Amino acid sequence: MKILFAASEAYPLVKTGGLGDVIHSLPRALQALGAEVRVVLPAYRLVLEQMESLRIVGWLQVQGAGRRHEVRILEAGSRHLGVPLLLVDAPLLFDRPGNPYLHPDGYNWHDNAERFTVFSRAVARLAADNGLLDWRPDVVHCHDWQAGLVPAFLSLDSRAPASVFTIHNLSYAGIFSHQEFEQLALPKAWWSPDAIEFFGNFSMLKAGIVFSDHVTTVSPTYAEEIQTPAFGYGFDGVLRAMRHKLSGILNGIDTEIWNPATDPYLPSHYSARHRYLAGKRDNKKALLAQLGLDADEAALKTPLLGFIGRLVEQKGIDLLLEAIPALLAHPGVRLVVLGSGESRFENALRELAAIHPGQLLLTLGYSEELAHRIEAGCDLFLMPSRFEPCGLNQLYSLRYGTPPVVHAVGGLADTVVDATRENLEAGRATGFLFRQPTTDALLEAVQRALKLYRNDSDWHRLIRTAMAQDFGWSRSAARYMALYETLRGKSATIHTPSVETAGASPNCHEQP
Ligand code: ADP
């Protein structure tokens, strides 16, 4: 089974969130099951700077916005991702500072439509045209809106392999204007609600949904939720129409990188069986010291809460902000926050940290090292996301013996079992769930957690169960393999959308 992964980020080369983690770990897991996987990324400056040697595979002329790009396809070998890496090198579009989507000043690159259309056109050519790679994938697995046009371009080529499109987060939909649609010379027939038009604009995410042979999202619950107006971001209609080819496969985690027994970022190693108490304690002391606090015995005994994440509404940061004064009113409780994002949230956190010195320990920015240390050093991990396609941090915190307090949505509902008395006694409980996205519900769940924390035997049982969960990739990778098997040999058909309303046609891309 040969799989080409097309995505816009991959840890450790370039990562802004969970997508980067998945593009690092899923290909390796598939490879372990016998698949041959290659990953293709845009050749961002940041990525090129990390390469020592590159082979030029070939050149492509690719249509951009009113101009053509001379694109180099580069091959970087397996050193970085554990599987061969290909790069789409279009220097005018990707050789720049900043993150993959944003200017260093924080706004979207003005030409993101062109950047990811050129990337997608090049990937489709690579996948369908034997001449370039000397390697023909059975399936092209495309991730998020940046690769959403790949299945659409593949559908124009009768030689093309089958495609899978994975939605990692529906709220980032790659929406651009009609003017950009025209400049990019996209096929006129695609300007239809039945194809990629989206309420007067067009959406690259919708292209992936409509034109791929199968759509997955990263947890079973999120696959259901996105078919409802409350979670559908306007795509619920088209997703309901496509439900015959939509499924949820839970993300896994890289259990080597996220392993408290070997994690090189941790000052003290531990596992569920070995040094759990001492290891947690040492890591807590070191974390507090790193954040400027010399923790005495009393401080080490009182609960330390943690939060890591992008500071955007999705992550429920507004709920957390409102809850902080009440949380910190509990005697001795401290909260460690690591995140970066919208300035309104960063400013509000700064203000609260000034009001609660030594209690709200705030780091604004991005740090892999500190993220690992927070997972290990805290007693409870807060994840009040308003929606969460899968979520990785709660999985890391389970593995690090730091029970998560989560809003019961998406992947959080699929991966955390509430510490009710019944679940505790049955040895199933792993964390704390709350059902409504309100500050009161969050506080109530934290209060339950703090109460349990004072009961040693219940607490240790909870932690043992949490640490025993297997969220490695093997089960989910096997599900992807089974899906690829059903699609292998199914080459894409020329797609001619009929003009119907968005989502009204379940037969939009049926195979003949
Ligand atoms: P999302 O993809 O929506 O951001 P996930 O929970 O799926 O959320 O994945 C987030 C990933 O990014 C995790 O690996 C998390 O540790 C990491 N992360 C997020 N913010 C930061 C930060 N400020 N510093 C370090 N790591 C971060």
Image (cartoon, grey):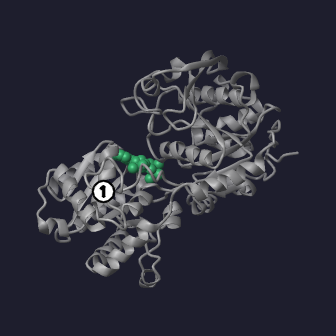
Q: How far across and down, in percent of the image, does residue 127 sit?
A: 71, 31
Q: How far across and down, in percent of the image, does residue 276 sit?
A: 31, 66
In the rendered structure, the answer to whether residue 295 lies left or right of residue 121 reads left
- Residue lying farthest right? 512
Which residue is located at x 81 percent, y 39 percent?
A: 491
Q: Toward the viewer: 471 or 104?
A: 471
Q: Looking at the rendering, in which quadrant would you find the N terminus?
A: top right
Residue 173 position by quadrant: top right
Residue 231 visible in the current orientation: yes
Q: How far across and down, in percent of the image, does residue 440 sit?
A: 35, 71
Q: Toward the viewer: 239 or 32?
A: 32
Residue position for label 1: 269
Residue 311 visible in the current orientation: no
Q: Looking at the rendering, in which quadrant would you find the C terminus?
A: top right
Q: Residues within 10 Å of mark 1 (few under 14, many from 20)?
A: many
Instruction: Tell me the element at label 1.
Output: loop
Residue 463 position by quadrant: bottom left
Residue 171 vs 277, above or below: the answer is: above
Which residue is located at x 28 percent, y 53 percent?
A: 337
In the rendered structure, the answer to whether residue 390 lies left or right of residue 399 reads right
Q: Toward the viewer: 214 or 379?
A: 379
Residue 288 vs 55, above or below: the answer is: below
Amino acid bearing label 1 = His
